[in-house]
Image (tube, rainbow, N blue to C red):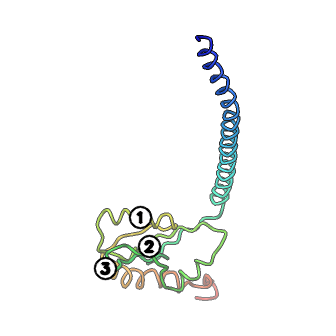
Amino acid sequence: GAQGEDGGGGGGGGGAGVGDAVGGSASVAREGSVIGQIVALNRQLRERQAAYLDRLWLAQRAPRVVVVANRLPVRVQRGDNGELLYSISPGGMVSALLGVRGMRMIWVGWAEIDDTTAAEREQIRRTLWRRGCVPVFLTKEEARLHYAGFCNDVLWPLFHYVVSRMPDIKTDL
């Protein structure tokens, strides 16, 4: 009787062992498949990281241009629901320079929005920085005085009415 119980238990154990071996090999196969997927994903991640670092290296080696302009190439406006909206700014210089390739451009200029909180200005800074822009926050009056006064009365004449050649003191005077 005892042997029958043990035998039955042993037989059940033996049967379970066989079942475990079959289930075990399926489990091992699943583990192998999962491990294979992890290895493949890890390889893809390393390849993407390497490609990103290559792009970053090339971008750092590209010529850099800092454009200081009245306005940024990205306009920030407040939508109907109060959300901040970003769009391409109008203007000839923006249109011309957005087509330039092979250079890292950093734009510094007026953000064209003045009714913002400190938190919104920080959000705008982060968003525009990712687009290569450094916003300057001015009130509308400061922007008007800067553009109409300093830019148009000082900078424009200084940089647009450049003398094409130095006068020769002996012959031109």
Judge depth for marks 1 and 2 and give the one in front.
Answer: 1
At label 2, which amino acid type do we have? Answer: Gly
How many residues crowd mark 2 within 10 Å: few (<14), some (14–19), many (20+)? many
Q: Circle 2 is placed at which residue position?
A: 109
Q: Circle 1 is placed at which residue position?
A: 125
The residue lying at 60 percent from left, 66 percent from top is 104
At label 3, which amino acid type do we have? Answer: Lys
Q: Position of residue 43 (x, y in %)?
A: 69, 47
The residue lying at 64 percent from left, 16 percent from top is 7
Question: Circle 1 — which element?
Answer: helix
Q: Quadrant of residue 34?
A: top right
How many residues crowd mark 1 within 10 Å: few (<14), some (14–19), many (20+)? some
Q: Earlier in the sequence, mark 1 or mark 2?
A: 2
Q: Position of residue 142 (x, y in %)?
A: 31, 77
Measure the C-alpha gap from mark 1 to mark 3. 18 Å
Whether residue 66 is situated above or below residue 38 in the rendered picture: below
Judge depth for marks 1 and 3 and give the one in front.
Answer: 1
**What label does residue 140 carry, if any?**
3
Question: Circle 2 — which element?
Answer: strand
